[in-house]
């Protein structure tokens, strides 16, 4: 990853200071260019993975999946065979307010379309005790226009080489719409899919604060082991 880091540094120099070829001028690094390159590095990692570091390709991500979630008002147990998840690398960044004193990025990211589908699934669970969730067959659901917001506080890894997430403040999200063509029992599929399209986004958005508070730390715990494999702190250090 040293080659990647050097490539990013040269790209940042070029973006941030077009006249830097004149060696009599000191190199000035553009904060926006640095942050932009870090996000592009993430996009490249999601699309291509890293065989060297044991990071798989995550868009598209192909695998058998098991989802097991249980809370008082919502539970779900689902097994998806030959599942494929797409759209994770197609994000665009609307806001990146960097604070060098706090070493934080206040950001707003939009995923236009995230899609999960599989050849076969089995599911059971409930929304509140009174509404059962059951089904089997082909699974196909799309999430349209997912907006993720949060202030990410950054820190160096123990060896000082990697950018890690220290914590996330004001973590929140919003979903514009779901679209589903999932099979349930071949009798009421159209009805259930229409309910998913019309109601699910609103239901999740209504409780997004509660959901975000539950999973903000989980996001940190999920990302940091991968971030720790790459020598990126030297890039961020140029604007501190």
Image (cartoon, helix red, strand yellow):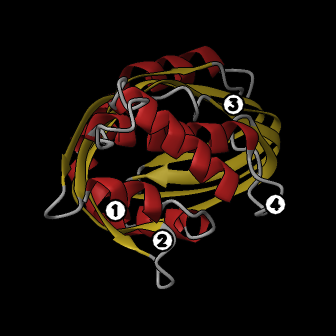
Which one is closest to the eye, mark 3 or mark 1? 1
Residue corresponding to mark 4: 52
Kindly indicate the quadrant of the structure image that contains residue 74.
Answer: bottom left
**Left or right of 82 in this view: 68:** left
Could one spot residue 110 in this view of the protein?
no
Kindly indicate the quadrant of the structure image that contains residue 227.
Answer: bottom right
Q: Where 236 falls versus 23 (above or below)?
A: below
**Left or right of 98 in this view: 86:** right
Which one is closest to the eye, mark 3 or mark 2? 2
For the residues labelled 1 and 4, the Cα–Cα distance comes to: 29 Å
Badge number at residue 216: 1
Front residue of 179 and 36: 36
Tell me which label, 4 or 3, sits earlier in the chain.
4
Badge number at residue 110: none
Q: Secondary structure at mark 4?
A: loop
| Residue pictured at 40% horizontal, 27% vertical | 15
Tell me which label, 1 or 4, sits earlier in the chain.
4
Residue corresponding to mark 3: 184
Tell me which label, 3 or 1, sits earlier in the chain.
3
Residue corresponding to mark 2: 221
Tell me which label, 4 or 2, sits earlier in the chain.
4
């Amino acid at each position: 990853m040293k080659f990647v880091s050097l490539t990013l540094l040269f790209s940042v120099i070029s973006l941030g200071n077009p006249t830097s070829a004149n060696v009599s001028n000191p190199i000035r690094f553009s904060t926006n260019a640095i942050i932009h390159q870090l996000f592009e590095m993430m996009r490249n990692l999601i699309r291509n993975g890293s065989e060297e570091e044991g990071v798989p390709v995550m868009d598209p991500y192909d695998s058998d999946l098991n989802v097991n979630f249980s809370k008082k008002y919502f539970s779900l147990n689902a097994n998806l065979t030959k599942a494929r998840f797409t759209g994770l690398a197609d994000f665009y960044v609307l806001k990146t307010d960097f604070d060098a004193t706090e070493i934080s990025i206040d950001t707003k990211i939009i995923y236009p379309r995230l899609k999960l589908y599989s050849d076969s699934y089995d599911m059971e669970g409930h929304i509140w005790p009174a509404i059962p969730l059951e089904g089997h067959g082909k699974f196909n659901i799309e999430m349209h226009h997912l907006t993720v917001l949060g202030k990410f506080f950054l820190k160096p890894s123990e060896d000082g080489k990697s950018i890690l997430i220290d914590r996330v403040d004001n973590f929140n999200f919003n979903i514009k719409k779901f679209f589903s063509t999932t099979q349930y029992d071949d009798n009421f599929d159209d009805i259930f899919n229409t309910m998913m399209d019309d109601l699910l986004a609103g239901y999740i958005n209504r409780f997004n604060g509660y959901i975000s508070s539950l999973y903000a730390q989980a996001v940190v715990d999920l990302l940091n082991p991968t971030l720790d494999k790459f020598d990126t702190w030297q890039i961020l250090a140029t604007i501190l």
